[in-house]
Image: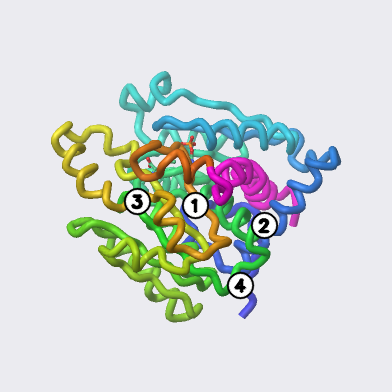
């Protein structure tokens, strides 16, 4: 079966809607666009087009990388502060979505529930791109896998060890690694778990691709002989509403899973350390690891821009 469909006009709400071939197409284009930018070769394939960007949560990387990448493509990107939109005064999501749809060529949105991006997509004909929800962060994973391929020169026979909140990033890493067919282990304290909806997709996909997804409470088991150590935030930003007591308990539960030099020593000698950032230094990772020679966190941050440009170019029809 040919699973490489034209991507023009498609939404990007979750990686689960994309085949391995389509993801590799995006990564290939991201590599090409990165190369073109480095050589100073113009690539304004979306001149005259426009995107709107709504961010209901904080962002440094996602917002700036979309904005800068849009400029390279000749695309105008408009940031809409959600607190000044009529949406915040009670205008319905569907009326907002239908209105935005009349002006722009795509909507990039960072919000809370996954259902919100799905609802925007339902009411819009133009592509909606998920820039992070509580459940998923697909744009980050495209950048992470571009980075893995750059550093490891392959996207097969790779073992991943992961620590971090049972939230959007683990779902996204599990989904991506199952689509690509890699072996992944999530080390997490007892009492924390991934959502069934995503676990079911991951298990089903791994059965087809030959990958695996293991959950353990044993950090050493997760990190021994891995090629990639992923250490993500213990308390995600959308959990800021937690009481101080709940936060303190959660930190106490997760602190034994911190990535430090000893943990990096359990991984393969040439293992890389990855984090989507922002990092909470001294919590999920030590300075020594984050700033150390195995860390590729700023390559990941840079690749956000190249992969997002590839997504925009394909979804908006700048390239076939
Ligand atoms: N990694 C990431 O999405 O960073 P921002 O929250 O700064 O956008
Ligand atoms: N897990 C993180 C991702 C930040 C980019 C969060 O949602 O806070």
Tell me the mark number nearer the camera, choosing from 4 and 2.
2
Q: Is residue 308 magenta?
A: yes
Mark linked to residue 3: 4
Image spot of residue 83 (x, y percent): 39, 21
Q: Is residue 119 above or below residue 76?
A: below
Q: Nearer the viewer, residue 159 or 28?
A: 159
Name which of mark 1 and mark 4 comes first in the sequence. 4
Instruction: Say which of 54 and 250 sits in front.
Output: 250
1 vs 3, front mark: 3
Choose the circle earlier in sequence order: 1 or 3.
1
Label 3 environment density (alpha carbons within 10 Å; few <14, some 14–19, many ≥20): many
Q: Which residue is mark 2?
A: 150
Circle 1 sits in a helix, a strand or a loop, which is it? helix
Q: Could you tell me which residue is drawn at 34 percent across and 68 percent down?
A: 221
Alpha carbon separation for disc pair 2 and 3: 24 Å
- Say whether disc 2 or disc 3 marks the residue closer to the N-terminus: 2
Which is more toward the observer, 320 or 98?
320
Q: Are marks 1 and 4 in contact (CB under 8 Å)?
A: no
262, above or below 38, in the image: below
The residue at which mark 1 appears reads as 138
Q: Residue at x 55, y 53 (%)?
A: 144
Among the two numbered marks 3 and 4 on one chain, the one whose residue lies closer to the N terminus: 4
Q: Which residue is mark 3?
A: 164
Q: Main secondary structure of the magenta part?
A: helix
């Amino acid at each position: 079966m040919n699973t490489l469909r034209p991507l023009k006009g498609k939404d990007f709400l979750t990686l689960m809607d994309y085949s391995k071939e389509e993801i590799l197409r995006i990564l290939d284009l991201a590599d090409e666009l990165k190369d073109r930018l480095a050589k100073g070769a113009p690539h304004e394939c979306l001149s005259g087009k426009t995107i709107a960007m709504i961010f209901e949560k904080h962002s440094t990387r996602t917002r700036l990388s979309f904005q800068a990448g849009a400029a390279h493509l000749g695309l105008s990107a408009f940031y809409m502060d959600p607190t000044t939109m009529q949406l915040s005064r009670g205008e319905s999501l569907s009326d907002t979505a239908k209105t935005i749809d009349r002006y722009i060529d795509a909507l990039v949105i960072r919000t809370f529930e996954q259902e919100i991006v799905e609802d925007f997509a339902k009411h819009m004909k133009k592509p909606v791109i998920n820039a992070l929800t509580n459940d998923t962060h697909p744009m980050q994973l495209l950048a992470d896998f571009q980075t893995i391929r750059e550093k490891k020169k392959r996207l097969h026979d790779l073992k991943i060890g992961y620590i971090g909140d049972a939230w959007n990033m683990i779902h996204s890493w599990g989904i991506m690694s199952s689509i690509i067919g890699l072996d992944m282990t999530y080390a997490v304290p007892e009492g924390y778990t991934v959502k069934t909806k995503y676990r079911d997709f991951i298990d089903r996909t791994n059965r087809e691709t030959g990958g695996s997804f293991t959950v353990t409470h044993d950090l050493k088991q997760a990190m021994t002989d891995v090629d990639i150590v992923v250490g993500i935030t213990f308390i995600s930003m959308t959990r800021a509403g937690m009481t101080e007591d709940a936060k303190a308990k959660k930190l106490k539960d997760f602190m034994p899973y911190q990535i430090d030099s000893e943990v990096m020593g359990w991984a393969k000698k040439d293992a890389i350390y990855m984090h989507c950032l922002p990092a909470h230094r001294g919590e999920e990772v030590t300075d020594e690891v984050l700033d150390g020679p195995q860390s590729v966190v700023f390559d990941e941050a840079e690749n956000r821009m190249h992969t997002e440009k590839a997504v925009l170019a394909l979804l908006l029809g700048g390239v076939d």
